[in-house]
Image (cartoon, rainbow, N blue to C red):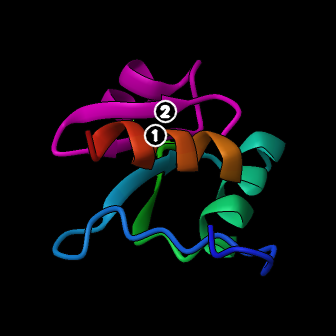
Amino acid sequence: MEAGSGHLFVTPNLMTPDLLYSRAGCHLCEDAEAALDRIGWLYTRIEISGEDELERLYGWDVPVLVRGGAVLLKGVITPPRLLKLTLSSSD
């Protein structure tokens, strides 16, 4: 976070966007997208509705943020959780 700005500037992955598995009408998914957008996180939203395999994998857990096949976060995704994730991955 830039001192005094009140905005987060996070660069999680410049090469390939993370995947956000989501479902239309899911308020947690909408909140996750807003959090990701707020801090400029590079991601691609994947709609799981009607996709049997994606429903099986992520149906109960959406939103789910994935990078390279590994789940980074699921459920409540907020800017503080994203920042903590970014800081812990830079160790």
Q: Residue at x 16, y 45 (%)?
A: 68
Q: Earlier in the sequence, mark 1 or mark 2?
A: 2
The relative height of residue 8 versus residue 74 in the rendered view (above or below) is below
Q: Nearer the viewer, residue 70 or 61?
A: 70
The relative height of residue 46 versus residue 91 in the rendered view (above or below) is below
Q: Residues within 10 Å of mark 2 (few under 14, many from 20)?
A: some
Q: Nearer the viewer, residue 88 or 61?
A: 88
Return the residue at label 2: 73
Is residue 49 shown in magenta?
no
Q: Residue at x 41, y 72 (%)?
A: 42
Return the residue at label 1: 85
Q: Is residue 43 visible?
A: yes
Pointer 1 and pointer 2: residues touching (CB < 8 Å)? yes
Q: Residues within 10 Å of mark 1 (few under 14, many from 20)?
A: some
Q: Nearer the viewer, residue 62 or 12?
A: 12
Horizontal and vertical percent for residue 54?
A: 37, 34
Q: Residue at x 71, y 33 (%)?
A: 76
Q: Nearer the viewer, residue 64 or 36?
A: 36
Q: Residue at x 34, y 42 (%)?
A: 66
Q: Amino acid at mark 1?
A: Leu
The part of the chain drawn in magenta is: 52-77
Is residue 59 shown in magenta?
yes
Horizontal and vertical percent for residue 28?
A: 76, 41
Q: Is residue 56 left or right of residue 22?
A: left
